Image: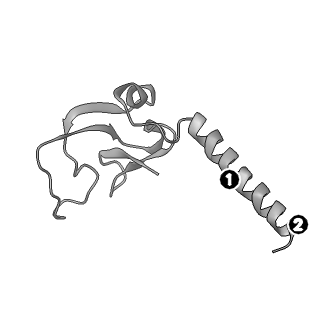
């Protein structure tokens, strides 16, 4: 590789780091908390089923319960999350994109 190619590679790597830092500052890497859930009009469930949003009848290993943000539409999930549901109008849970 010549110097121009190395310089271009360095600039590309720097650009990738800047983009990652930008999205991280907007909360795309934040942990889903009760506050984030409620701010997005989701419903926080301290002891919800990790199978929420899965089709009934599918095998789901659910040992106990999990803290989940329940939703019915994508706008009820914080940025960086989507409403995981198998059927429109059914309750789902916010999952990372």
Q: Identify the residue at horizontal 69%, vertical 45% (top origin).
A: 18
Q: Secondary structure at mark 2?
A: helix
Which mark lies nearer to you, 2 or 1? 2
Disc 2, disc 1: CB below 8 Å?
no
Q: Position of residue 75 (x, y in %)?
A: 48, 39
10 Å crowding of disc 1: few (<14), some (14-19), many (20+): few
Quadrant placement of the N terminus: bottom right
Nearest the viewer among 50 and 11 is 11
Q: Residue at x 53, y 36 (%)?
A: 27
Residue, disc 2: 4
Q: Is residue 10 above or below residue 30?
A: below
Which one is earlier in the sequence, the residue at label 2 or at label 1? 2
- Circle on res. 16: 1
Q: Nearer the viewer, residue 94 or 32?
A: 32
Q: CA distance from mark 2 to mark 1?
A: 19 Å
Residue 21 figure quarter: top right
Q: Give x and y (percent) for residue 65.
A: 16, 41
How far across and how far down the image is residue 14, in percent? Answer: 73, 51
Q: Is residue 93 above or below residue 88?
A: above
- Horizontal side of 71 relative to 19 (left or right) equals left
Q: Element type at marker 1?
A: helix
**Residue 83 at what x, y percent from top left?**
40, 47
Dot 2 crowding, Cα within 10 Å, few <14, some 14–19, many 20+: few
Q: Nearer the viewer, residue 32 or 42?
A: 32
């Amino acid at each position: 590789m010549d110097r121009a190619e190395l310089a271009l590679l360095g600039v590309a790597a720097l650009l990738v780091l800047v983009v990652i830092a930008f999205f991280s500052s907007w909360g795309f890497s934040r942990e889903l908390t009760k506050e984030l859930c409620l701010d997005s009009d989701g419903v926080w469930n301290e002891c919800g089923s990790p199978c929420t949003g899965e089709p009934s009848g599918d095998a789901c290993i659910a040992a106990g319960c999990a803290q989940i943000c329940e939703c019915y539409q994508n706008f009820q999930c914080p940025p960086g999350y989507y409403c995981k549901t198998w059927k429109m109008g059914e309750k789902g849970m916010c999952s990372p994109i």
